[in-house]
Image (spheres, rainbow, N blue to C red):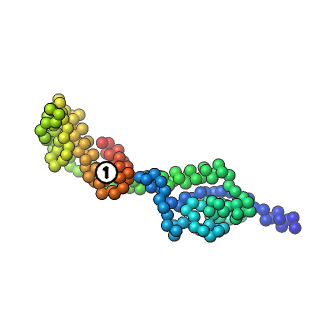
């Protein structure tokens, strides 16, 4: 009888924490998740957005459990809080990385399009603040040039024009924060 009880004692190891929700970098929070995207707990059968992957060390069996079910399903075993925190941070870091990659994927074609644009000729557009001003035709760019159109002011004019083009390309992104983040990424990639 003692041998049967001894064989029934298992040890478990928390191998991963999964948060199946998608991180929205613009909102800086997780998005809601549909039930068909959730994982079913091996113990209670309920659907969970955040689950623990637990491995039984004796035979390598893997269980996917809701965070509150490990104690009930695994005979009182509970993962160490520090390990849960560490793995949860890894899961969040991965979710944030995927979200940032989505913004980079949105930004990449805009970078290519703006970089491929032919920079229009810089022309005199009158005066601004009592100084000659220069800009581009069909553009809102207008910069005062107290010392005339120096190379530095020429570069400034081109950079402002490129930022204007970026702003025009991202204006179709409805979410303000997402639009701002994509715009910042594009401007960073273009060096403007």
Which residue is depicted at the point 70% across and 63% down? 72
Q: Position of residue 131 (x, y in %)?
A: 15, 32
Q: Position of residue 45 (x, y in %)?
A: 62, 70
View extreme (top): residue? 147
**Residue on which the image places disc 1:** 111
**For the C terminus, which image quadrant?**
top left
Q: Is residue 101 visible?
A: no
In the image, taking residue 58 as reference, residue 131 lies left or right, namely: left
Res 47 → quadrant:
bottom right
Q: How many marks?
A: 1
Q: Is residue 157 visible?
A: yes
**For the N terminus, which image quadrant?**
bottom right
In the image, taking residue 111 as reference, residue 96 lies left or right, namely: right
Q: Position of residue 13 (x, y in %)?
A: 68, 57
Which residue is depicted at the point 87% across and 64% down? 2
Q: Is 68 located above or below residue 189 in the figure?
A: below
Which residue is depicted at the point 62% across and 62% down? 66
Residue nearer the viewer, 3 or 144: 144
Identify the secondary structure beneath mark 1.
Answer: helix
View extreme (right): residue? 1
Which residue is depicted at the point 67% across and 61% down? 70
Q: Position of residue 119 (x, y in %)?
A: 20, 46
In the image, taking residue 94 as reference, residue 152 lies left or right, namely: left
Q: Residues within 10 Å of mark 1 (few under 14, many from 20)?
A: many
């Amino acid at each position: 009888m003692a041998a049967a009880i001894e064989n029934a004692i298992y040890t478990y190891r928390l191998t991963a924490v999964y948060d199946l929700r998608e991180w929205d970098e613009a909102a800086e929070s997780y998005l809601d998740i549909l039930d068909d995207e959730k994982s079913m707990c091996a113990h209670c059968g309920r659907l969970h957005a955040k689950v623990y992957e637990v491995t039984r060390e004796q035979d390598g069996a893997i269980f996917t459990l809701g965070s509150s079910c490990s104690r009930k399903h695994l005979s009182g075993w509970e993962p160490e809080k520090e390990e849960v925190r560490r793995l949860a941070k890894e899961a969040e870091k991965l979710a944030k990385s995927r979200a940032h990659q989505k913004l980079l994927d949105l930004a990449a074609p805009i970078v290519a399009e703006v970089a491929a644009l032919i920079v229009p000729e810089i022309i005199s557009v009158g005066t601004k603040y009592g100084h000659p001003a220069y800009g581009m035709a069909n553009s809102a760019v207008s910069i005062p040039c107290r010392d005339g159109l120096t190379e530095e002011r020429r570069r400034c004019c081109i950079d402002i024009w490129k930022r204007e083009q970026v702003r025009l390309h991202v204006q179709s992104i409805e979410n303000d924060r997402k639009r701002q983040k994509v715009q910042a990424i594009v401007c960073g990639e273009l060096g403007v």
